[in-house]
Amino acid sequence: MCPVCGGYVALMTMLICDHTEGFLRVCYYLNWTAQRASPFSRFDTSDIDTTLCTHLVYAFGEIDTSQKTLSISSSTDYRHFNELKTKNPELTTLLSLGGDTDRGEGFLNVSQTDTSADTFATNTVGILRVLGFDGLDIYWIHKTTSENYLRLLRSIRRAFDVDPGSPRLLLTINILALRNELAEAPIIQEISKEYIDYAILMTFDFVSSFYDQITHYDSPLYAIEGANFNKEHSTEWAVSFYRSLGLPLHKTIIAVRGAGKWQVLQDTSLTDLGSPTKTEPYGTFFKVSPEYMLPGAIVYPEICRFMLSNASTARVFDEKHKAVYLVSGENWISYEDTDTIREKVTWARKNGLAGFMFWSLDQDDFSGTGCEQGRYPLLSTVKKVMEALDSSPDNLDTTSTDSVKTTHTTAPTKPPGALTTATRKTTETKLSEIETTVTMLSETKNKGIT
């Protein structure tokens, strides 16, 4: 029985648990990474290991608003990407539209009316088939109206359903893990029941050097209690919240990324979780990743190099919240490593979720030159965990495989301060508590109480 299913009707238990056999490993390929100046971070399709992911997503395509269709200006790149299926015929490939910096103009243009949405959807089916994609991923983050969003998904779903091609085209969406304009039960229920195959919850980016004034985890598995923290900033809470709105677990994919958040301490003698940090003026960053040039962030292979070259670096694994951070001087970095990846994949699989998404392929140590752990240590861990769970679900070896040389790091046996207290409650109990809280908040809102 799935741990998360306890206390629910037997039918729901079967529906959730029967989906664990097809656990998805979704990986994003960013089309601009091949243009990077640094050989250490430059990444193209030839660097992709086709054995590590079940689904590869090309980010991003563009919308041709004049023709109400997909732009084919990158068709050569698309074909090279889909040729990866010759190496692994079991791969599923999707084209993603939108992105974090996309303001949604193309989506709004093609979803103004039912006719325009239907035209776009029909044209999209033909282009996806010609280019060799197996589905479409809608990464429409900056939405101004749910009406257009629902209209677009509805039209795409209808077009996919009447398409006689094989295999059946997949439709996936990305949803911010935080509360947003879609976080209403009727909307989520309509989307999940009628239109999509899977929803990817963006369960990271819970900390920002712009507005966070204390050290904070970018993507903890479990919520952090306390007045200075928002308990909604965790993977478990996000999954439970959207489940309470009507998104079933067997359509839910959690996400992690290879880039860690880089904060700067105000006082180097205060290094625990919740310690004061310098707040950056909007538009500026104290730190920029040296090879990937990401503002306010540092990518996993860069983190490994940082640890290996700074003997004073302390790596701390937080057992309670299943998160890791490192401290070196004024630098405080929250990130994912093989230990946190293992915890999240195991949690997702054992609780009946559809899968796990990694953003993005270039942010793992794809060359094996940064971490001394071989190629793709993070994604290799995902694969190993899945193989272990498939062969023996109740006896997964949780021994750490994070092999950054211990001579260069110090790893306290338990996190400092309050993090060493009370043992975490069981997953079933915590999910129930969170869902009860969400229900109470919803009832309060409906009564007009603020």
Image (cartoon, rainbow, N blue to C red):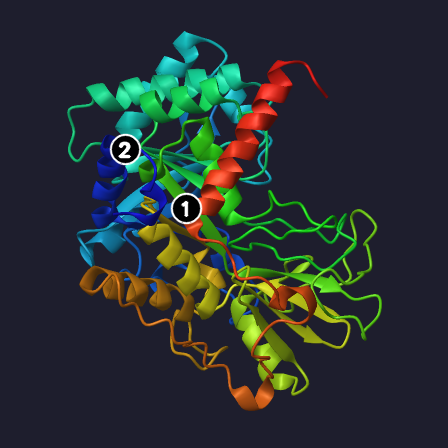
Q: Disc 1 marks which amino acid?
A: Glu
3D distance between C-alphas at marks 1 and 2: 15 Å
Instruction: Give whichever of 422, 42 is nearer the camera.
Output: 422
Quarter of the image with the C terminus is: top right
Residue shown at the point (53%, 19%) measured from the top left: 146
The answer to whether residue 333 is left or right of residue 283 is: left
> What amino acid is at disc 2?
Met
Query: Which residue is label 2 attached to?
Result: 12
Outermost residue toward the bottom in this view? 407
Return the x and y of residue 40 as percentages of the image width and height. Answer: 52, 72
Element on which disc 1 rests: helix
The residue carrying mark 1 is 428
Question: Closer to the camera, 365 or 37?
Answer: 365
Q: Position of residue 154 (x, y in %)?
A: 37, 18
Residue 354 lies, with reference to residue 72, above or below; the image says below
Q: For numbered disc 2, what is the local secondary structure?
A: helix
Q: Position of residue 59 (x, y in %)?
A: 44, 45
* Tag of residue 88: none
Q: Nearer the viewer, mark 1 or mark 2?
A: 1
Q: Residue at x 39, y 46 (%)?
A: 58
Residue 3 pos. (x, y %): 33, 49
Q: Is residue 1 above or below residue 273?
A: above
Note whether 84 is above or below 110 in the view shown. Answer: below
Q: Is residue 371 left or right of residue 133?
A: right
Q: Quadrant of residue 96?
A: top left
| Residue 176 visible within the image | no
Query: Which of the two labelled residues, at mark 1 and mark 2, occupies the earlier sequence position?
Result: 2
